[in-house]
Image (cartoon, rainbow, N blue to C red):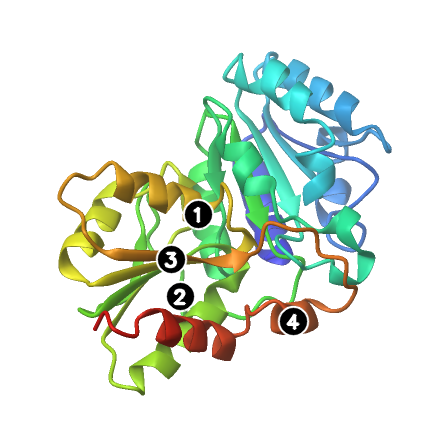
């Protein structure tokens, strides 16, 4: 996803001279092409994340389109107050790009895990939140961000993210992407867990279940229509994310279902529990440990729907 983002940003910068890229001494091996081609539009502010947000806000107030790139915790949690006060309150066209969604930096420990960022960012007025599921979705979201004038948070994987799509899908903010239709259960997935969600849907399909699978690259705005439709047409709904079950996609779907007076589906959130991840290991290892592998997701769904279908 990082390469897809960087390639898309280069294309955007070639067309739009107002594009500025800021980083906090990160992005080595991926940001060099931008720095080399647009040296005057690339700023490395050093390890000064809160100042980085202030610089981004100032440039945005000077008619610049600003992209801020860093590892997720450093671009969201470390400078939350500056994002709220400097960017969101003024409704500035700054895109915060968080690399390493979920447990991508699993070997670096909990300081580098991003399991609360979606909840934090979607709580801010004016902030849009996008979590593409693969490089193709990343390119699709970037096409929108290239022209958007809204504050936005783009959460991407660290790299080597598997391709779910053969070609770039159609993307509209606030709309889900239907990967397959079904009538028994609906699965909503966001972010780089999408591949595992699709594989889990395949496993469930082999048991005879008719599974509706929707990708949610747009978490805020959320596709209320797709959620309401699923609540009417399927008997159970599941959200899947590599994020805490509190406040992320699961929270957004639950809020939508709860406010829909005719909805009566069973709903469950599949994600990271309300705890810190104290283990250290690869993303794959941690997914296995916390029930986010494709097989574990399928087994969890099977156990939860017993007696419902």
Few, some or many C-alpha atoms within 10 Å of disc 1 (few <14, some 14-19, many ≥20)? many
Do labels 1 and 4 touch, CB within 8 Å?
Answer: no
Which residue position holds label 3? 268
Callout 3 secondary element? strand
Which residue position holds label 2? 167
Image point 50% across, 61% down: which residue? 134
Farthest residue in the front direction?
307
In the rendered view, tell whether residue 269 sits above or below residue 86: below
In the rendered view, tell whether residue 162 sits above or below residue 250: below
Residue 304, percent across and down? 36, 69
Few, some or many C-alpha atoms within 10 Å of disc 4 (few <14, some 14-19, many ≥20)? few
Callout 1 secondary element? helix
Few, some or many C-alpha atoms within 10 Å of disc 3 (few <14, some 14-19, many ≥20)? many
- Distance from the alpha carbon under mark 2 to that under mark 1: 25 Å
Quadrant in which the C terminus appears: bottom left
Query: From the viewer's perspective, is the residue at label 2 or at label 1 nearer?
Result: 1
Q: Residue 22 vs residue 94: left or right?
A: right
Image point 76% across, 51% down: which residue? 110
């Amino acid at each position: 996803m990082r390469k897809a983002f960087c390639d898309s940003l280069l294309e955007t910068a070639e067309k739009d001279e107002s594009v500025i890229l800021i980083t906090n001494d990160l992005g080595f091996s991926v940001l060099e092409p931008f720095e080399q081609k647009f040296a005057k539009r690339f700023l490395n502010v050093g390890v000064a994340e809160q100042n980085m947000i202030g610089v981004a806000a100032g440039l945005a107030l000077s008619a610049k389109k600003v992209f801020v790139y860093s590892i997720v915790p450093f671009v969201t949690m470390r400078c939350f107050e500056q994002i709220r006060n400097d960017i969101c309150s003024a409704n500035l066209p700054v895109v915060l790009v968080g690399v390493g969604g979920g447990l991508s930096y699993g070997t670096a420990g909990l300081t580098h895990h991003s399991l609360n960022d979606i909840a934090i960012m979607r709580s801010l007025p004016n902030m849009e939140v996008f979590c593409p599921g693969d490089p193709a979705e990343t390119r699709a979201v970037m096409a929108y961000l290239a022209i958007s004038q809204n504050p936005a948070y783009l959460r991407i994987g660290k790299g080597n993210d598997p391709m779910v799509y053969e070609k770039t899908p159609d993307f509209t903010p606030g709309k889900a992407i239907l990967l397959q239709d079904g009538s028994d259960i609906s699965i909503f997935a966001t972010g780089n867990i999408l591949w595992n969600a699709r594989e889990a849907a395949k496993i469930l399909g082999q048991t005879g279940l008719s599974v509706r699978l929707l990708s949610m690259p747009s978490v805020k705005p959320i596709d209320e229509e797709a959620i309401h439709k699923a609540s009417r047409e399927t008997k159970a709904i599941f959200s899947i994310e590599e994020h805490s079950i509190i406040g992320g996609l699961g929270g957004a779907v639950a809020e939508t279902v709860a406010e829909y007076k005719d909805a009566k589906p069973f709903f469950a959130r599949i994600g990271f529990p309300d705890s810190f991840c104290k283990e250290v290991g690869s993303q794959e290892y941690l997914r296995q440990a916390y029930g986010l592998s494709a097989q574990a997701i399928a087994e969890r769904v099977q156990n939860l729907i017993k007696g419902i279908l």
